Amino acid sequence: MTRDETVIGECLRAAVEGPFFPDGELHTLLGLFREELAAVLEAWPTFHDVETQRDAVNGTLNNLLNYPHAEWASWPRYISAAPEEVAAVYERWWSANARAD
């Protein structure tokens, strides 16, 4: 697994298991329920539904970086990369995976 894939996997795990997104807001923020996000995490970095995986990664990284979760102290328990590295991973991932709607 590449470093970027590892970081994305850690971010997915943080979204599923961590304190970053309350249950009542997760679907609104990410467009997925926790169980759906957990399925993407379980299969990461492969998944049979590319669109769902793209939505999961996009929503997770974007909201970990931008949603006011006030859980920065919890970040290192779930994610080995600093927010700046996650932002760089997100940029690379977005460049390679953004939809051309």
Image (cartoon, rainbow, N blue to C red):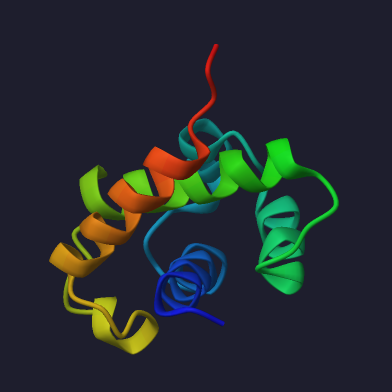
User: Is residue 66 shown above or below 98?
Assistant: below
Front-most of 6 and 79?
A: 6
Front-most of 15 and 43?
A: 43
User: Is residue 101 shown above or below 69?
Assistant: above
> In this orientation, does residue 74 appear?
yes
Residue name at image x 60 percent, y 42 percent: 54
User: Is residue 79 shown above or below 95?
Assistant: below
Q: Position of residue 87 (x, y in %)?
A: 23, 56
Residue name at image x 38 percent, y 82 percent: 78
Q: Residue furthest top?
A: 101
Q: How many marks?
A: 0
Q: Position of residue 68 (x, y in %)?
A: 20, 47
Residue name at image x 48 percent, y 32 percent: 98
Q: Position of residue 50 (x, y in %)?
A: 73, 43
Dividing the image into 4 quarters, which one contains the N terminus?
bottom right
- On the rendered structure, is 37 left or right of 80? right
Dividing the image into 4 quarters, which one contains the C terminus?
top right
- On the rendered structure, is 6 left or right of 77? right
Q: Quadrant of residue 11?
A: bottom left
> In this orientation, does residue 69 appear?
no
Q: Residue furthest front?
A: 96
User: Is residue 73 shown above or below 63?
Assistant: below
Residue name at image x 66 percent, y 68 percent: 45
Q: Quadrant of residue 75?
A: bottom left
